[in-house]
């Protein structure tokens, strides 16, 4: 079953109750004969009672099925993805991503 990934604006600060996050880039990565959608960003917690912190992360929505195939009701691009559910596959992908750059989290 496919999921929809609604693309976010690159470089736009999105505030949440204790800080913000920014998506720095989207990339398409070849893996296992298919193409993955990988979103790289960072999150900063700067408005919390527990102190300040941050992390650089990757979000892997899944394998690309239909790249930016339509727009949603707000006019934002939507890509259909096949989510990665297998833990072994997730571990290998996370390891490959972390080998190339500093990432504190890889989420699927």
Image: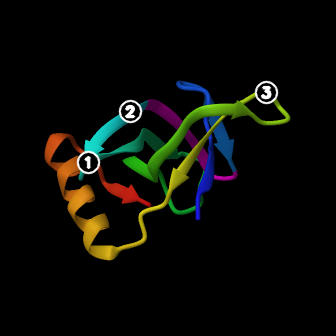
Q: Quadrant of residue 36?
A: top left
Circle 1: element type: loop
Mark pair 2, 3: CA separation: 21 Å
Task: Tell me which residue sits at (38%, 48%) in the image.
Answer: 57
User: Any mark on residue 33, and which?
Assistant: 1
Residue 87 position within the rendered picture, expressed as x and y whole percent measured from the top left = 32, 75
User: Any mark on residue 75, and which?
Assistant: 3
Report if residue 59 lies within the magenta region. no
Question: Considering only order in the chain, which callout, 2 or 1, is on the residue closer to the N terminus?
Answer: 2
Task: Tell me which residue sits at (14%, 48%) in the image.
Answer: 99
Circle 3: element type: loop
For discs 1 and 3, the disc positioned in front in the rendered view: 1
Q: Quadrant of the N terminus?
A: bottom right
Residue 5 position within the rendered picture, expressed as x and y whole percent measured from the top left = 60, 46
Give the residues drawn in magenta, as a range.
17-25
Kindly identify which residue carries mark 2.
Answer: 27
Residue 53 seen anywhere in this rendered image of the structure: no
Residue 7 position within the rendered picture, expressed as x and y whole percent measured from the top left = 61, 35
Q: Quadrant of the C terminus?
A: bottom left
Majority secondary structure in the magenta region: strand
């Amino acid at each position: 079953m496919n999921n929809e990934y609604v693309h976010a604006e690159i470089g736009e600060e999105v505030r949440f109750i204790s800080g913000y996050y920014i998506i720095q880039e989207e990339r398409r990565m070849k893996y296992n004969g298919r193409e993955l959608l990988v979103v790289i960003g960072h999150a900063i917690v700067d408005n919390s009672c527990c102190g300040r912190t941050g992390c650089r992360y990757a979000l892997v929505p899944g394998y690309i099925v239909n790249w930016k195939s339509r727009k949603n009701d707000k006019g934002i691009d939507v890509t259909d993805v096949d989510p990665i559910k297998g833990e072994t596959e997730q571990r290998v992908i996370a390891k490959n991503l972390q080998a190339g750059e500093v990432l504190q989290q890889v989420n699927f």
